[in-house]
Amino acid sequence: MRSKILIVDDEINILMSLEYLFKRKGYEVYIARNGAEAKALADANKPDLVLLDIMMPDVDGYEVCDYLKAKVPAPKVVFLSAKSKKDDVQKGYDHGADLYLLKPFSNKDLLQHIQELI
Amino acid sequence: MTVLLIVIGTAYLGFIFGAAWYFEKRLSNLGYRKWMPYIYALALAVYCTAWTFYGSIGRAAESGFDFLLIYIGPTLALFLWYPIARKLYFLKVNQGIGSLADLLSARYGKDARLGKLVATLSLVGVLPYISLQIKAISESFDVLSQRETQYNAGFSLEDPALYVTLVMVAFTVLFGTRYVQNNRPKAGLIGTIAFESLFKLLAFLIVGFIGLNSFLKDERFFTALDRFSNQSVAIPTAEWASILLISAFSFMLLPRQFQMGVVENTSVKNIPKALWLVPLYMLVLNLFVVPFALMGPSLAPDTKPDFYLLSLSLQAGGPATAALAFLGGLSAATSMIIVSTLALANMVSTHVLVPQIVWKKEKPLDRRIIGLRRWAILGILILAYFYYHYIAAKESLVSIGMVSFVAISQFAPAFLGALFWKQAHRRAAIESISVGFGVWFYFLVLPEILTVITGDRHFLGFWSPQILAAEMNISILSAATIFSLLMNSIVFIWRSLSLEASQEEENQATLFVQANSLLQGPNAPEVYRGTAPFPNIKSLLINFLGNRRTEEVLDRYARLNNIDWSSSPTADSRVISYAERLLAEAIGPASAKIMISSVVQREELSRSEVLNILEESQKVLQLNRELSSRSEALRLATEELRNANEKLQEITELKDEFLYTVTHELRTPLTAIRTQAELVQDDPEMPEEDRQRFIGNIVSDCDRLTRLIGNVLDLEKFESGSQKLSLSKLDLGALLRDTERQFQALAKKRGHILRCEISAPLMATYADVDRITQVLHNLIGNALKYAAAENGQVWITAYQLDQDLKVNIHDNGKGIPDADRELVFDKFYQVRNQTRRKPSGSGLGLAICKNIIQMHKGRIWIEDNPGGGTKISFTLPLYQEAQKLKPTKNSEDAQ
């Protein structure tokens, strides 16, 4: 069965390119442009992994992460963020993330990390 | 009425005993320190006696406004009072000064004769004045109880003044002679005198108010007032000048004033408030004098003018009001009697009586010294009582007071010389005071005596004082004042200039005249050298201060100076002069000097050595002052640095924050670019359509990056002040319409309606056209971005408002929350406020707009808009010429 990935970002170009990338690699991909959409899609499709931006309109990434990690079974969560401070990274892990990747990243690295996680 | 007066009089006297006892217990507490300046000022108001309370009205009734001179004199004196009072306070502490006699004696070589002279003459000068107060008490009682005053009845047990006098003895003994050291402040005494001053003021105001209230209903008052104000006032210059001068001197030198102003003062810090409080007090106390003086003759023709207050208050307000007036007079009289008697007793006992017993074998003498003072108090009051009875019966209140004033003024030249003139000489002081008193006696006492002896006031023919004064066309008081002070001063100056001072006197002169510029306290300079066995010094102290007090003061001295008495068998010069000061506080400077000499091997210093020591002290003091002013400057500098540092840190933090946000904003488009570029690169088989899409996106993301960097640099230029405006003529209307046309395409693409409405032609102004264009692009772009998705509308309106051009850009989007109206102009507001975040835009646009508008001295803000949507407005001032607009260096300042 194909692994399901949910990508959440309010930056349309990033969202579209990541969707393209993971689809080409054979994942089942869902995309959300904000936190509320993300929650709804996660409920509906039970993704194995969520790629999550932090700064978004309405609900921020941390809150979405909390929501996801409270589910059983919980999906893996990878933060993709431009927030570069040590504190930001720490905060991401404190919210239960499995990985924190700083933007910009290389597609190769991202794919490799994802494969390790699922 | 008689019974009422006796009851309330007794109650009042009982009350002041209670008050004194209370103050003695409580006032020494530190918590009361903040009240001390007020208490000090009130205590100085002991100047206002029964003579003020009753006599001012009498004087005003007889000779108009000149009663005020007696209060103007002290007010003028208070202008000069601060440096004098400050110096006197230092001298009191460092020289053990407990009275004017102590002061003059100590200054003029610790001379015993001078002390005796001052003490005796003070007694002679002031005794009648005390009698006057007793007389006021007795007469006021008689006026109200309608008794005939029996002056010639001799000693009478029915005279209430007798009992008051005895009570005064008890009070003064109880609260005035608590310590053997004369110059220790006595809290019970100060507190009570201050209380009595307050009481007499309130009593006078209440009675005065009630009186005036009833006079205003009486038309005789207005005719009297009319007459009074139409009176042509002859100005007897000599008389006025005399009264001003002697009242000013008396305010400083009268025994009771010196006692309250110097001896009982607890701190230099008390003085400044008194400088304005005392004149204010005297002014208020005289508020109602004139109305009473005007109504007296018509309402109480049979009463002596001095007691108009009593008769009129009885008529106006009944017995209760009259009783209050009586109590006010009683408080004025008693406070004067207490303090004057105490001060005189201290002088007389210290300078006349104590020298007789200092060699007595039985020791210690401290109780005996206090005992002598108590006997002196009793003696003085008995004398005053009898003097009142037999001599003072006929004179009005004010005239006797004036005689005292002239007498006391005779100390003024020697006093001022003591403080300010190094050359002032001991013998000059003695001779000038004697001459002054001689003249005083001749003019103001002799006529009375002659009358008593020969029955003829003009017994001396042409040389009779009255005839002499009349020849010169001045009053006898003026003649006495002018001649006594003139001759006094001439003798003083001439003799001081021609005599050579002794070493001891010269040292003291320096210490007094330079008191302000020498070190004070334990580091005060020593001007002689000597040693003595410590036990001798100690036993000397015990002899005069008693065991307990000696232990106390020595213990304190040891603690302050880190000395262990048991390990220092020899007292050095510092200890010796400390001991001498302590002794002086108990037995006066002259006796103290003799006592110390009896146990000390003193070595005379040469003149140049003394000068060196004093110079040293001055230098050290100077150095101390410089050091403290430097450390103050350092403290200020440190504070400034700290503030600057804090500001820098704040700025640094802001910069860090800015950089962090900028990098964040850079990372986002970079991420998109990289991801898409890698997709294209890694996937050679990607369909052409996808490839084109990704490459197109990459290009627009690059544009976005470029815009962002451009904005960051722009903003940086504005904020650092390096951005300059290049001004030219601006037709805002044309520019708005142009911009609107440019944006029409974008509006159409989004399905929005864009309108520009300019109702009247706009005046031209000067502005940086490129920058204003940038602002318009930003604002209109934003508005199109945030307008409602369906049926989006944007209106641009512009008009002239006073001296400004105003532009509004209004969209029908969801608007900005009230709380954020200011914040949207902050850098990266979007970033911080995630709910407003939209994918495009740098987050710097509005911040840049704000900077541009502010550089043009305009204003930009979010308008209140209940209709919904966002309405952003800015103004541009109308300028006639380009050069008028000078941008501020930092646009933030313009906020």
Image: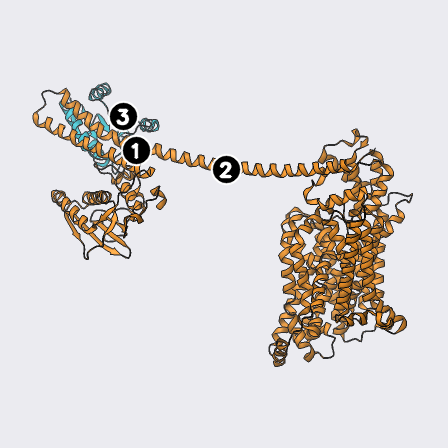
Viewer-closest of B69 and B462: B462
Determine whether label 1 and label 3 are within 8 Å by CB. Answer: no
Residue at the image point whose x is 41% and y is 34% from the top: B649
Residue type at mark 3: give it.
Leu
Residue type at mark 2: give it.
Glu
User: Which one of the lettered chains is coloured cyan?
Assistant: A
Distance of label 1 from label 2 (alpha carbons): 33 Å
Q: Is residue B372 left or right of residue B283?
A: right
Element at badge 1?
helix
Q: Which mark is residue B830?
A: none
B502 in relation to A3, above or below: below
Viewer-closest of B319 and B591: B591
Viewer-closest of B441 and B298: B441
Residue labelled with disc 1? B661
Of badges 1 and 2, the one in the foreground is 2
Mark 2 falls within which chain?
A: B
Q: Is residue B617 left or right of residue B840?
A: right
Residue labelled with disc 2? B639
- Colour of chain B in the rendered structure image: orange
Label 3 Cα crowd, 10 Å radius (few <14 / some 14-19 / many 20+): some
Element at badge 3?
strand
Residue at the image point whose x is 17% and y is 26% from the top: B676
